[in-house]
Image (cartoon, rainbow, N blue to C red):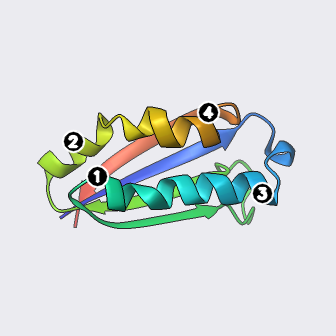
Amino acid sequence: MLHHLCLITYKDPALVDAAAQAAIDAAYLKLPSIIPGITSMKVGRDLALLEGNADYAILATFESKDAFTAYSTHQAHMDIIYPALGHFMAAYSTAQFEG
């Protein structure tokens, strides 16, 4: 089992209102029905408990490294995720780990 963590920083968090955030969440939560090998997908806006945190987190679990590789290059990122998130995103970082 492989876990993928993605932390996203918004250009201006104040511009990501409840409707925009719901659209971003919905876009990510569609992926398990589109991309084989995703066993779970969790998403959430940062609670701002610590200064300097990223604004948004995605935690996805995959059956295998091959399933993650397929996900990482899947066209759904451009077709589904980018339209909802792209214009809000300033930066992101990722990590993958087994467990």
Task: Say what secondary structure mark 3 lies in.
Answer: helix
CB contact under 8 Å: marks 3 and 4:
no
Q: Residue at the spot x=21%, y=41% of the render?
A: 69
**Percent x, y of residue 70:** 21, 42
91 on left or right of 49:
left
Residue 31, quarter of the rendered image: bottom left
**Mark pair 1, 3: CA separation:** 25 Å
Mark 1, residue position: 35
Q: Residue at the spot x=72%, y=60% of the render?
A: 50
**Mark pair 3, 4: CA separation:** 15 Å
CB contact under 8 Å: marks 2 and 1:
yes
Which mark identifies residue 86? Answer: 4
Q: Which amino acid does label 2 sit on?
A: Ala
Q: Which amino acid does label 3 sit on?
A: Ala
CB contact under 8 Å: marks 4 and 1:
no
32 on left or right of 14:
left
Of the numbered discs 4 and 1, the one sitting upstream in the chain is 1
Of the numbered discs 1 and 3, the one sitting upstream in the chain is 3
Task: Say what secondary structure mark 1 lies in.
Answer: loop
Camera-side mark, 2 or 1: 1
Q: Which amino acid does label 1 sit on?
A: Ile
Task: Say what secondary structure mark 4 lies in.
Answer: loop
Of the numbered discs 3 and 4, the one sitting upstream in the chain is 3
**Mark pair 4, 1: CA separation:** 20 Å
Mark 2, residue position: 70
Which mark identifies residue 19? Answer: 3
Give the class, few, some or many, for how many residues have Cα within 10 Å of label 1's Cα (few <14, many ≥20): some
Give the class, few, some or many, for how many residues have Cα within 10 Å of label 4's Cα (few <14, many ≥20): few
Camera-side mark, 3 or 4: 3
Of the numbered discs 2 and 3, the one sitting upstream in the chain is 3
**Percent x, y of residue 64:** 14, 56
